[in-house]
């Protein structure tokens, strides 16, 4: 099964999709006049300053935190490690290139989500790629919108939203409490696993259930509290690692750049051609920041705003924080400490090695810090992706409550069994569904890029940015 999934993943995340995502980001960057550079300051200001009198279910900051709760997850810790180990240090370079272009992509997604969103009779707001495909491209493209919604449901239930996240949490907990697997329990067809993994699966599933049953507003409220705290905790931790090993930083940067264009010079041939570094970097970058996937605009549509451009800018900061700040810091720590070169280490164990050999604390404290970061990152991603996939299901079914309730319990069940599945199969499955989501969304962004450019020009020409 794993071999089959790898073959499917190679097809989905082949050169055509990478070209589609990178070309889409490049086209939008050009049409928006490199907006991600000269409007980044304004975007960061609006990130924490809510719009007065805006229409929506939650504040702009809460909508961003909901989106960040879904994007800042195991991809920032485990995904970066996986990319660097599989594609060499050069994968980090291509991850950053994809993120820079992805800022323009994420901006456009947020703008279109607000422009084409639908306000229901009960005040609930529904929006995202399914609506800007159907309303922006025309009713004849509704089949593409439904296709996106289907892939979004599968990505949430079987990929990025559940199994990969709880798998990361369980792995980190085991590293702290039972690294030598001394306390094992037999679980029938699920195999034999550490008691630490079993307990963490049950606790995470119960906590997720308590929040998910409460719907969007409870998810947004929890995200507003946890997301800023967890991001600051992780950034401060990795900054300490980098500063205490600052003499290694120049060599690490050279290794990353050299590995991007000549991987064999860095890896000694263990990794294939440059295309492998690009593929792993772009795929894991998209997994982390979700630019091009079409997930974040689902949360953006619920923001209390009357200005699509404003929310687009707020959305753009998500990619900046997620990949250009957090993923870069993770990647640097892995390269600086040589964690990526350690044989036999996979997933969270790579980042754990970097923390243990880079931080000025004892090994147990380092493992606990990483465990706490991973728990917060992954748990909020579980919540955010439940919201995304529920909205996709709501679009497909017309919002039937019985269907939504059933889905929530299936989602919680997927969280419960996630730690007992193999790491490679889990990440490969997540990659496949991410890629399938990106295809209809990127098609829409290409078609609607002119509308986004005109909306942007009109907004700034009218001086509306000075009035907000």
Image: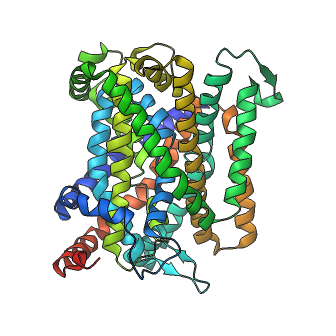
Of 361 and 85, nearer the camera is 361
Of 111 and 26, nearer the camera is 111
Quarter of the image where one finds residue 35: bottom left
In the figure, is residue 310 to the left or right of 55?
left
Considering every residue shown, the one lying at the far bottom of the view is 121
Q: Can see residue 183?
A: yes
Image coords of residue 401 (percent x, y): 72, 72
Q: Can see residue 70?
A: no
Which residue: 77% across, 18% down?
183
Count of numbered circles in the view: 0
In the figure, is residue 322 to the left or right of 152?
left
Image coords of residue 138 (percent x, y): 40, 78
Considering every residue shown, the one lying at the far front of the view is 361
Quarter of the image where one finds residue 168: top right
- In the rendered image, the quadrant that contains the N terminus is top right
Which residue: 45% across, 79% down?
139
Image coords of residue 377 (percent x, y): 53, 43
In the figure, is residue 98 to the left or right of 356?
left
Quarter of the image where one finds residue 115: bottom left
- In the rendered image, the quadrant that contains the C terminus is bottom left
* Image position of 25 with respect to 88: above or below: below
Image coords of residue 106 (percent x, y): 35, 59
* Image position of 377 with respect to 218: above or below: above
Which residue: 46% across, 51% down?
228
* Image position of 340 with respect to 393: above or below: above
């Amino acid at each position: 099964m794993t071999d089959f999934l790898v073959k499917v993943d190679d097809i989905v995340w082949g050169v055509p999709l990478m070209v589609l995502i990178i070309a889409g980001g490049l086209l939008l960057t050009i049409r928006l006049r490199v907006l991600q550079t000269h409007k980044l300051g304004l975007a960061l200001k609006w990130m924490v300053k809510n719009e007065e009198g805006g229409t929506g279910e939650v504040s702009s900051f809460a909508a961003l935190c909901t989106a960040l709760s879904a994007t800042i997850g195991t991809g920032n810790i485990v995904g970066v490690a996986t990319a660097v180990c599989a594609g060499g240090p050069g994968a980090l370079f291509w991850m950053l290139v994809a993120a820079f272009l992805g800022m323009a992509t994420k901006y456009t997604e947020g703008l279109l989500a607000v422009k084409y969103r639908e306000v229901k009779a009960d005040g609930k707001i529904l929006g995202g790629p399914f609506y800007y495909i159907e309303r922006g491209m025309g009713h004849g493209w509704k089949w593409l919108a439904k296709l996106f919604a289907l892939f979004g449901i599968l990505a949430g239930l079987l990929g990025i939203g559940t199994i990969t996240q709880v798998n990361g949490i369980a792995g980190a907990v085991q590293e702290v409490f039972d690294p030598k697997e001394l306390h094992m329990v037999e679980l029938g067809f699920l195999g034999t696993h550490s008691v630490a993994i079993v307990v963490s699966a049950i606790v995470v599933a119960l906590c997720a259930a308590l929040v998910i049953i409460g719907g969007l507003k409870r998810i947004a409220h929890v995200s507003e509290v946890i997301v800023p705290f967890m991001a600051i905790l992780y950034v401060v931790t990795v900054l300490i690692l980098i500063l205490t090993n600052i003499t290694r930083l120049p060599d690490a940067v050279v290794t990353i750049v050299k590995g991007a264009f000549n991987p064999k010079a860095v890896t000694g041939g263990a990794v294939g051609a440059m295309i492998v570094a690009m593929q792993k970097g772009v795929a894991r970058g998209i997994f982390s920041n979700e630019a091009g996937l079409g997930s974040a605009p689902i949360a953006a549509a619920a923001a209390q705003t009357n200005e699509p451009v404003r929310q687009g800018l707020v959305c753009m900061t998500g990619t900046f924080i997620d990949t250009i700040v957090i993923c870069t810091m993770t990647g640097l720590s892995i390269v600086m400490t040589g964690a990526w070169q350690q044989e036999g280490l996979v997933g969270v164990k790579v980042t754990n090695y970097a923390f243990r050999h880079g931080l000025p604390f004892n090994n147990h404290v380092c493992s606990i810090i990483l465990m706490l970061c991973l728990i917060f990152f992954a748990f909020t991603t579980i919540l955010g992706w439940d919201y995304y996939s529920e909205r996709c299901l709501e679009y497909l079914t017309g919002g039937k409550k019985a269907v939504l309730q059933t889905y929530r319990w299936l989602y919680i069940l997927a969280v419960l069994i996630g730690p007992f599945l193999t790491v490679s199969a889990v990440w490969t499955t997540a990659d496949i569904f991410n890629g399938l989501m990106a295809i209809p969304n990127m098609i829409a962004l290409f078609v609607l890029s002119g509308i986004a450019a005109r909306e942007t020009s009109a907004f700034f020409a009218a001086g509306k940015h000075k009035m907000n």
